[in-house]
Image (cartoon, rainbow, N blue to C red):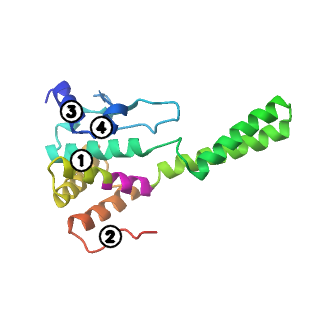
Amino acid sequence: MEPNVEIRRLFELMPASGRMMAKIISRPEQAKVIDASFPLPWQWERPIYINFDLWRRLTKPQRDLLLLQTVSWLIAVKWFQPHPYQGILLVGLLGGLVEFLQQDAVGVVMAGGLATLAGYRIWSVNRSQQSQLNADLSAIEVAQRRGYSQTESAQALLSAIETVAKLEGRAALNFTELIRCQNLRAIAGLSAVGVPED
């Protein structure tokens, strides 16, 4: 598999919003099959690192769904959208600036603490199990627009999660991966038990 050819193919597979932000980079030295760092507010470009030596061991549907899930998660991370936590973060930052200009140390600490708590909450919501489940669903929706059926795409993503763990030399899936697998089994019709809403 020629990495540049595969990168072009994967780029065409992405949704338009993913093409604007995501950049696929070959990184043969990494232990993970596919990796993406949590995007920070000032980062417009969101790199996705792939170890093509491991990547080529996956089937085409597994590769497609794994990439679509990663892209879906990356584009879902939005630091600046109308939400109470973003408002609290903005108020904390502006309050800290005002208190700094007034040379009020206690006010700066209070406003900084408020901004830190709001920023941490935004970060944790975007790193949560629910964000991964939402990214799985988005990836399946995009895959359906690319010719996969819902069942086929759910099965491909399920098998990709399990295969990636083996390729990376992990003995078992982590807790989030287990929850995702159970949800994907329910979507694929392989299990009657899904993930509870709450």
- Going by the numbered disc 2, the residue's amino acid type is Gly
Mark 2 or 4 closer to N-term? 4
Quarter of the N terminus within the rendering: top left
Q: Name the disc covering residue 53, or none.
A: 3
- Where is residue 139? Give x, y as percent: 28, 50
Q: CA distance from mark 1 to mark 3?
A: 18 Å
Q: Secondary structure at mark 1?
A: helix
| In this picture, residue 48 sits left or right of residue 83 | left
Q: Name the disc covering residue 65, or none.
A: 1
Q: Residues within 10 Å of mark 4 (few under 14, many from 20)?
A: few
Residue found at x 80% / y 31%: 100
Residue found at x 70% / y 42%: 92
Q: Residues within 10 Å of mark 2 (few under 14, many from 20)?
A: some
**Residue that badge 2 annotates:** 194
| Magenta extent | 129-137
Mark 3 or 2 closer to N-term? 3
